[in-house]
Amino acid sequence: MKRPADPRTWWLAAAVLVALYGVLALLVRVVPDNAIDRAVFDWVGAGNTQPLDDVMDWISWFTDLNPRLVLGAIGIIAIALTGRYRLTAATAIAAAVLAIPIDALDWLGGVVAGRIRPNGAPFLAYPSGHTLGTVVQYGFGIYLVFRIGLRRGLELPLVALLALPILAVGPARVFTGLHWTADILGAYLLGGGSVIALVLVFEFGYRWLTTREKFRDSLRPVLEPAPDSS
């Protein structure tokens, strides 16, 4: 059996992503009107059509905080209904531990970059909050799907559904004129590091709950993987 990676390796990976996020914020501060951001913004503006604008507006709405909170609550309730009480509790622990640090890094990056949005709205542009929240929530959701171990007929479609918002939110925020390309890249960097940290804290919390025999699971076999017929 392949030995699992040392948690310190994953913490280092998370730290590298967050460090790159910080470096990008500094670069934006030094060169706010850079050629890459400007070229992408002009290209997007030249190619906009009403149907495309409508799709991008809907993606931006779907990845806003309120819809994500509703879907997140539904997801947690669904996990609890499968009988994974310990997993549900560990998820709550991870969210409680890292919510403030992630928000603080989000705010600090915006202050360091010090750039407003391309549409002129007087709000800090870096990083894209929609993109960051979507990557964190749905990225961790993908991990939970694999962690639970559902039947393949349920697992793969769920992973695909959770991956779609992650892939779509960044382009949508640029197409709607609400963020620069660097804002999106920064959000993906911080979001990736945050997901890794969430997974590590989740696993620590799960082991802690298991050691103390808290929140015993009561599994629903219908959602479990089918036994290997070989």
Image (tube, grey):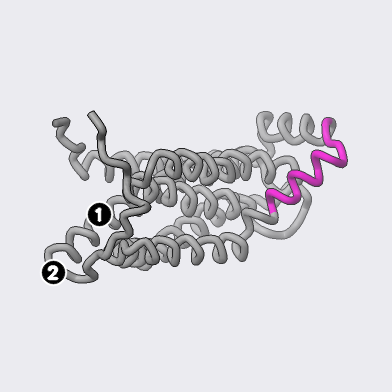
Residue 74 visible:
yes
In this rendering, the label closer to the viewer, 1 or 2:
2
Left or right of residue 126: residue 221: left
Q: Which residues are magenta?
A: 47-60
Give me the C-alpha separation between circle 1 and circle 2: 14 Å
Along the line of sight, the residue nearer the viewer: 148 or 224: 224
Measuring from the top left, give residue 185's x and y in whole percent: 55, 39
The residue labelled by disc 2 is 212
Outermost front residue: 229
Which disc is residue 203 wearing?
1
Q: Amino acid at mark 1?
A: Glu
In the rendered image, residue 66, in percent from the top left (x then y), is placed at 61, 65
Q: Looking at the image, which is closer to me, 106 or 52?
A: 52
Residue 37, quarter of picture: top right
Quarter holding the N terminus is top left
Q: Earlier in the sequence, mark 1 or mark 2?
A: 1
Residue drawn at (36%, 47%) of the image: 150
Measuring 50% from the left and 48% from the top, which residue is drawn there?
135
Of 134 and 10, which appears nearest the observer? 134
Q: Residue at x 62, y 41 (%)?
A: 168
Crowd rating for badge 1 (residues with CA inside 10 Å; few <14, some 14–19, many 20+):
some
